[in-house]
Amino acid sequence: MRKKRTYFNLLVGRPQAYPSMPSHIRGIHMGNAPGRYSPSAGMRRGRDGVLLVTARRSTGINPRRRNPIDPSSPNLAPP
Amino acid sequence: MAMASTTSQSQLVEMSWDPVTRIIGNLGIHTKIDFGTRRVVECKATSSIFRGYSVFLRGKDPRDSHFITSRICGICGDNHATCSVYAQNMAYGIKTPVLAEWIYNLGEAAEYMFDHTLFQDNLVFVDFCERMVKETNPGVWERAEKTEAKNAHIHGYRTIADIMRAFNPFTGEYYKTALEMSRLTREMFCLMEGRHVHPSTLYPGGVGIVGSPQVFTDYLSRLVRYTDFIKKSIPLNDDVFDFFYEALPGYEEVGRRRILLGCWGAFQDPEHVDYRYETMTRWGRKMFVTPGIVVDGELVTTDLVEINLGMRILLGNSYYEDWVNGEVFVSHDPLGNPVDPRHPWNQTTIPKPQRRDLENGPYSWVMSPRWHDERTGEYLALDTGGGPLARLWVTALANRVHTPYVESTGHSVRIRLPKSASFPEMEFEWKVPKWANTIERNRARAYFLGYATAMAFHFVEQALNCIRRGDVKVFQDFEVPDEAIGVGFHEAVRGVLSHHLVIRNGRIANYHPYPPTPWNASPRDVYGTPGPYEDAVQGMPLFEENGPENFKGIDIMRTVRSFDPCLPCGVHMFLGNGKTIRQVHSPMLGLAGGAG
């Protein structure tokens, strides 16, 4: 057990953080890690590597009905 | 602001402004003025606060650095975040998606619009307002009342005096409109970067917002409103500044210094930037504000690699110990070029607090960044001209920016602003001026607002093109390497900004941000070369009509403020030993008068 000490009239434990502690904790998934971004629902990779979206990005309810009728039209999925 | 004066030998009078108000941070200007010849004989610029970012960034996760360095400044923190992201992109080997780059550019354009408007119209123009001019130059005020404004048909103010009335703080019409515009442009900024002034949606690899048609049209609708304002503002600025040249012959000498301008470039072109050091020369030249160095009116380089390798951090009159025999973090750049021990990659900050000695030094916490000119061997004290002057000057001479809205010509920059609610399409041309002086620094700020506005139209169109073709990728995943170096070059609102990063064991081993104010506010270096503020003020003539008893130092303050000083961030007042305060006043007039 960590040693406790009295700080003014409070009994406190040893600090578990230090000023140069990084924000990332080992073992936790990192947002920047390869493969974490592209598989989101409603996103797919186009022919020249660009990431394209469909209405599935915005809704899970009948998303295909909300895609443009003409496949050559731009898909302007709301956020 | 406190003004302390002491009469010493002969006719010299010591005058100090410490801290200078209506700027950011704590800058002290200490002068010796000869009231016989009405000239400033000597000037020293001091900063009395130590920040220590380069010290406490060591050992941290490099992915935190843009969030931490953003806190360097309370007005242009996003410039630091962006620059840090650029440096990290290089270190991690990331090429950011196209749409993300347009979003960065849109956010930064909004920041320039916000910050320059706030500074120029709400802070600088107090020095040119009715009440200030009446107090310092009653003769000029009389003339202003009789002088018709050439561009009155655009901005609506019949005489120069009418314009000056509109500048009055808190009550002037133009002052109040500018405040509204600051709010509007901040909203534009927040649409792109999440939060002002410490962005929450910028990351190495991209951004965290979802690029949708709505977010860009929201931005565009505000941009068109702002365009109306800037179309009035540029001719109004021209009227005021041209009037000062006419009313006070010789005013071009105020704040004039040798033309030594540095610009590190802004607005990446996503078609070309890959953030690799090896290709930095090429993609740097594709930026929509060209990086470069102008010496005596001649464009010396536009090569970011050359700019990077020429950087030197000198000491001489700063409160630091020398590090030159310490650890060398980067001996050669990725192209194999040797890197100097005084380069920011190799700098170690060793603070040495001590008493200020204005006579023999040291006297400032600011170091002395210089650029080593290989041609002459000189260590040049570059300034930024407040930011816009250097940006426009380099972009004009480099002749590399050719967009539908902004065109550089080799000797000027043409800015085309599309139709807006009150005005048809209008074109403005910023021409390379004869001098790098107070008036031209201020004038360039107004033109650069037009530049940022025009470029924002281009960026919005490009971003919407991405959306229309369904390319909405805004983030590129990456891994943090164990060992890497990176450098980011950007333009903070008030000038050059670089972040130099060294990663070892996945942690920051060395990190040095160099914002514009260390360049501008640097003290005399080890070779005795004064910093740009000191150089610009020293030797300048004074046109203020007041004598030493009620001297305000308006010409000196106009000069210092023309550089848009930003020494974040502290409150400090130093009056010196044995000096007597003769007068305390507030330059804000009105409500705060007498508060100091």
Image (spheres, coloured by chain):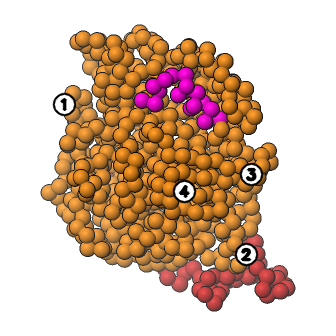
Asked where in the image residue B168 lies, by quadrant, the reply is: top right
Asked where in the image residue A27 lies, by quadrant, the reply is: bottom left
Q: Amino acid at mark 4?
A: Thr
Q: Which chain is red?
A: A
Magenta residues, start to end = B236-253
Residue at position x 37%, y 17% in the image: B38
Name the dominant secondary structure of the magenta segment.
helix
> Circle 2: is it few (<14), some (14-19), or many (20+) Cα within 10 Å?
some
Q: Which chain is orange?
A: B
Residue at position x 69%, y 72% in the image: B465
Residue at position x 38%, y 64% in the image: B303
Q: Nearer the viewer, residue B385 or B472?
A: B385
Circle 4 marks a residue in which chain? Answer: B
Residue A33 x/y as whole percent: 48, 79
Residue B313 x/y as whole percent: 27, 51
Q: Which residue is mark 1?
A: B360
Q: Which residue is mark 3?
A: B425
> Circle 4: is it few (<14), some (14-19), or many (20+) Cα within 10 Å?
some
Of circles 2 and 4, which is in front? Answer: 4
Mark sitting earlier along the chain (1/2):
1
Q: Which residue is mark 4?
A: B409
Decide: is B405 above or below B360.
below
> Circle 3: is it few (<14), some (14-19), or many (20+) Cα within 10 Å?
few
